[in-house]
Amino acid sequence: GENVEQHPSTLSVQEGDSAVIKCTYSDSASNYFPWYKQELGKGPQLIIDIRSNVGEKKDQRIAVTLNKTAKHFSLHITETQPEDSAVYFCAALLAGYALNFGKGTSLLVTP
Amino acid sequence: NAGVTQTPKFQVLKTGQSMTLQCAQDMNHEYMSWYRQDPGMGLRLIHYSVGAGITDQGEVPNGYNVSRSTTEDFPLRLLSAAPSQTSVYFCASSERGRGNSPLHFGNGTRLTVT
């Protein structure tokens, strides 16, 4: 949706390198920020989420950081592997109950 | 658990035809929603429901109707299909009705309108 901007739209990294995807949102009342991974032919799957009372959250090779003042949040994937290749979506919960998604980042990890 | 089940997986319609995309979840989730996914556009919210008997419009509701008569089912109806509705449609559910808990997606319905 137009209230969540995601960059870059495509990202190519070598296996073992780190990948960073950034999102900005417009609604200062947003308080829930999930990240989804979508593999070809499947529905998106949640990989990590963060709430506005937390600045950073980590789960093994994946981390998300949130800067509420600047209204942006980022996904960091370390030690990338070929199976990390997929489309990644950020999202922000707007006022009410609507989760708005960014337009997606196609990540390619080359061996 | 089957999770979120969408049927059919593929559908081709002619302009003006009607059809219903089915969505069922077996997790007793309060919240259900429909998204469409178009190349370069990400996921856009069509309609959502925070519980049985309650529905509301999302970002792109025109041309679609929904109802939520049971907790488990959330069908999406196209009354008169148009080529602009060619897309991949995803149904998603979450435990809590406020949209701030993880969404579980089905595997999608690929719709082509000729």
Image: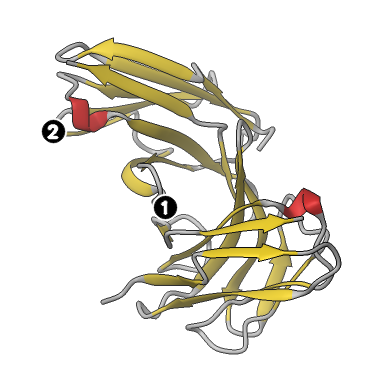
Observer-nearest of A92 and A43: A43
Q: Residue A101: give x, y in percent of width and height.
A: 56, 40
In this rendering, position of residue A15 left or right of residue B40:
left
Query: Which of the numbered marks, if any, corresponds to residue A60?
Result: 2
Crowding at label 1, few (<14), some or many (≥20) Cα neighbours within 10 Å?
many
Cα separation, mark 2 vs mark 1, equals 23 Å
Residue occupying image coordinates x 61% and y 71%: B49
Provide the secondary structure element on which disc 2 rests: loop
Using the image, name the chain to which the residue with label 1 belongs.
A
The residue to which callout 1 is attached is A43
Q: Please, what is the three-letter code of the amino acid marked with disc 2?
A: Gln
Which x, y percent locates residue A69?
52, 21
Instruction: Give the position of the C terminus of chain B as an image quadrant.
Output: bottom right
Residue visible at 41% across and 33% down in the picture: A87
Residue at 46% x, 18% y is: A10
- How packed is label 2: few (under 14 Cα within 10 Å), some, or many (20 or more)? few
> Could you say which quadrant of the image residue A83 lies in?
top left
- Label 1 element class: loop
Q: Is B21 left or right of A80, judged from the image as shown?
A: right
Residue A97 visible (yes or no): no
